[in-house]
Every structure is written in C-alpha cells, then in structure tokens.
Image (tube, grey):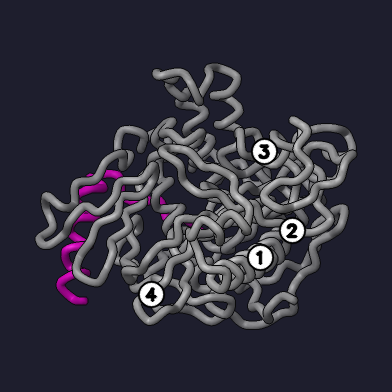
Amino acid sequence: MSPAAPPTAIRLTTTPNPLPHTISSPATRRPSHLSMSAPSRPRTSPLAATAAAGGAPSLLAADPSHRDAVLLAARGAIANCLGETHLDLVVPGLRLAAKGKVRDVYESGEHLVLVTTDRQSAFDRVLASIPFKGQVLNETSLWWFNRTAHITPNAVVSCPDKNVTIAKRCSVFPVEFVARGFVTGSTDTSLWTVYNNGVRNYCGNVIPDGMVKNQKLAANILTPTTKAADHDVPITPDEIVKSGLMSKDDFDEARNKALSLFEYGQQVALENGVILVDTKYEFGKTADGTIVLIDEVHTPDSSRYWIANSYEERFKSGLEPENVDKEFLRLWFKNNCNPYEDKILPEAPEELVSELAWRYIFLFETITNTKFEIPDTQEPIHERISRNVAEALRNL
C-alpha cells in the first residue's frame, strides 16, 4: 500500500494518454519543503504547451526556441565542463574519500561533500562530459529529496553550490535497489537483455513467457545488484541476507522504501507527461540506526524516462519509446564500438553531447515545472565550487 504523497507543486489540467496497466495519479496535496538551495522560477510546462497547441507529436519538440537556446548554450559550455575535481587541494580540512564514475566524495568531520561532475557514465565506464549535467543531477535529486521525505528520511544537510550537496556521514549498504516497471534496456544486466536470453526468474522475480521489449510489467519489481570489481552483479534477496550484505530486517525496510519511492516517482512523473520506467536507489544507516536515502533520486542518470503521450501508440507499432535519458547515448556507443571490451572508445559527437544536455534540462523542467538556470560560464566551475564549499564548511 503506497504512502500518502504530495504531488508536484503544479498540477496539469490535461491528462496524458492512458498506458496499458495505467499508473494512477495521487491525490492533490501541498508539498513540504526542506530548506536548501534550488534556484528556479516558474515556467510553462512543456506538456501544457503541447496541450495548448492541440497535441504536438513530441514533448521534446514542444518549445523549439527554448530547445535551440539550450543547445547553443551547451555547445558554448563544452570546454567548461566539470570533468575532474581537486577540492582537497584548495579547501582546508577536506579529504578525498572516493571518486566515482560521476560523483567525487570528500570528507569533512561528520559530513560528506558530494560533488556531482559532468562526467557521463554507462557500461561501467566514463563515456563523455555533458555540459550542465552535474547541476541538473544535483538539483533534480534535491527536488526529489524534498518531496520524498514522507516516505523515507535522507542524508541531505545543505546545498552550498549548484553541483554540491553536503550530507550526513552514514554506513552505506553495498546493494543497489533497482526498481523496474517495464521489460526494457540495453545493458548486460537490463531486464530485456536477460529476458531475451531466456531468463524467466531474475533476482527472485518470476517473469512470464510471451512478453516483448518495452512492455509494462503487471507489477513493479526489484532487481538488486551488488558491486564486484568494476561492474554490477544481479543478486537475489536471499543471497543478500545469506552473504551478510544486509540483515533481513534492514533489507525488508529498504526494499519497502524503494518500492514506495518508485511508485510515488511514477505517479509524479506521469502527472507531468513522462513515464518513470526504472531507476535505482541507494541507502545507508546512520549512527543511531536510521535507514536513510542517499546518493541521487530519480535523475536521468539513475533512471529511464519515456514520453507518456506517445508510448502506447509507439509500443503497438513496434517502435522504441521516446526516451528522455542517456539511453540514446548508450545505443550510439553500442552501434559504434564494443563499450564493454574496447580499451579506447570513439569520442561522442558534439551534436550528441549537446542533445543529451538538452534532454536532461528538459526532464528537469518538465517534472519540476521550473526553469533551469544556465550557469555563468565565464567563471571556472571548479573555482566557484571551491569557494562555496569552503564557506559552507566554515558555517557548519
């Protein structure tokens, strides 16, 4: 049973076309807000613009002048992407704790400083740098952290910079909770890949015969993974408990939180014209034993999104859904190299990089109903982040 949930701040007056096994919309309630920085101002929803125009074929093309402006800004910012960070060299008392594929994590006493870079990862490796991506991911996560506190507490303390979140230190569970609503995907661990290879019991979930790619599941499922060297490994709930990765009580609590977060995320996304197809969550445990949501929430990096009002027709016609995430970049690399085995990958075309920047910003604006503020590219991002983090730590 899903928890009571506040939807997005602005309800749409039109409803997307129904999906097979349509996801229901939540009741209207006012959201509660954490005190954190998320620079934004109201703007017309692309979905509302589409409805006003009598139903354009794609939400991605609903506001061509805005799209052109973002693409132009993205092309101009490619040289100023945040690829690497070295805050430990310029901010007193800061120590580099971990460097992930996208986030760099620094330690400062009882707090962690999470810097979201512009690095783009897939296939367990970095593929490119995408302008504004780090800011989009950070602000998207903060928006969702704000609106999911009724489901689970999170580790967020403050947001001193567009690319930075300061969080409470906690013990991280070595399991990623992957929630899925559709049979789709292109990676080795995606549900469609394993299903197409004949697997019918995946991570403890029985998947019936006769399903096709991009079909909606009868009910949402979890397919947990754990890390082995540099790649994700699917694992069943029983294996998680038996191997000592999590206790049964901790796993059950985290599983319930993940499914509730996913259901709520699907509802909010659908209200705004997109489908939350699948996503992943990570959890940690604080010193007092509280399980908290960490890392990121419902970002286009951790999630797959499709345009809702074209899904049903495209599915019936055997066409791929319109995606608003990094899937088209994954497919480009799969078509031009072996991203799992080739030591050197081809450079992503500038057109592809700029398009992905637009799609990330489009998704942020569509779901939050706010305008993404393109940062001043005159000041180097690393200098801005270093200054803001140093000031925030002095005031903690």
Disc 3 to disc 2, how far (Cα)? 15 Å
Q: Which residue in the structure is indicated by mark 3?
A: 185
238 or 83, which is in the foreground?
Answer: 238
Quadrant in which the C terminus is drawn: bottom left
The dot on residue 286 is 4
Q: Amino acid at mark 1?
A: Leu
Q: Which residue in the structure is indicated by mark 2?
A: 220
Between circles 4 and 2, the one closer to the viewer is 4
Residue 114: give x, y in percent of width and height: 32, 58
246 or 5, which is in the foreground?
Answer: 246
Q: Amino acid at mark 4?
A: Thr
Examine the structure image and report whether residue 375 is included in the region drawn in magenta: yes
Mark 4: secondary structure: loop
Residue at 50% in and 27% down = 351
Mark 3: secondary structure: loop
Q: How many marks?
A: 4
Disc 4 to disc 1, how far (Cα)? 21 Å
Task: Give the mark, 1 or 2, whose residue is nearer the N terminus.
Answer: 2
Q: Amino acid at mark 3?
A: Gly
70 or 83, which is in the foreground?
Answer: 83
Question: What segment carries the magenta color?
Answer: 371-396
Q: Is residue 120 left or right of residue 14?
A: left
Q: Is residue 339 left or right of residue 381?
A: right
Task: Give the mark, 4 or 3, whose residue is nearer the N terminus.
Answer: 3
Q: Which residue in the structure is indicated by mark 1?
A: 259
Q: Are marks 1 and 3 in contact (CB under 8 Å)?
A: no
Residue 319 to residue 248: above or below? above
Residue at 41% in and 65% down = 39
